[in-house]
Amino acid sequence: PVNRDYETICSEVARLLKQAREAQEISLNALSERAGLSRQTITFIEQELRNPTLETLLRITTALEIDLEEIIAQARKNSRRDVRKTSS
């Protein structure tokens, strides 16, 4: 179960990062420039094809001007809610 929780949290972090980027109407190209990352890297993260390193997460959240700690906390909260939904 613990491994599944990590996967759910990672998936939710990716979803929240994409949601934040889209809410700010920032293109993948603009975010990649701001974060100093390739467009492909950001795409892979948003599509859950790659788990980002801490440095990559910090680059993305800094570029989006959002707090990484809040993203992780929200992802954990959302994943717990999702686990409750699937277990009922």
Image (spheres, grey):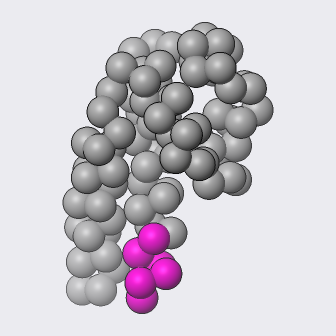
Q: Residue lying furthest front in this view?
A: 55
Q: From what the image shows, is residue 39 above or below residue 8?
A: above
Q: Identify the magenta region.
A: 1-6
Between 59 and 20, which is closer to the camera in this rendering? Answer: 59
- Residue drawn at 57 percent across, 13 percent down: 34
- Residue drawn at 65 percent across, 13 percent down: 33
- Is residue 18 left or right of 44 when viewed as pictured? left
Residue 22 seen anywhere in this rendered image of the structure: no
Between 19 and 76, which is closer to the camera in this rendering? Answer: 76
Q: Is residue 88 magenta?
A: no
* Residue 9, image x, y percentages: 41, 62
**Quarter of the image with the N terminus in it:** bottom left
Q: From what the image shows, is residue 20 above or below residue 4?
A: above
Residue 72 seen anywhere in this rendered image of the structure: yes
**Quarter of the image with the C terminus in it:** bottom left
Most common SS among magenta residues? helix
* Residue 31, image x, y percentages: 58, 18
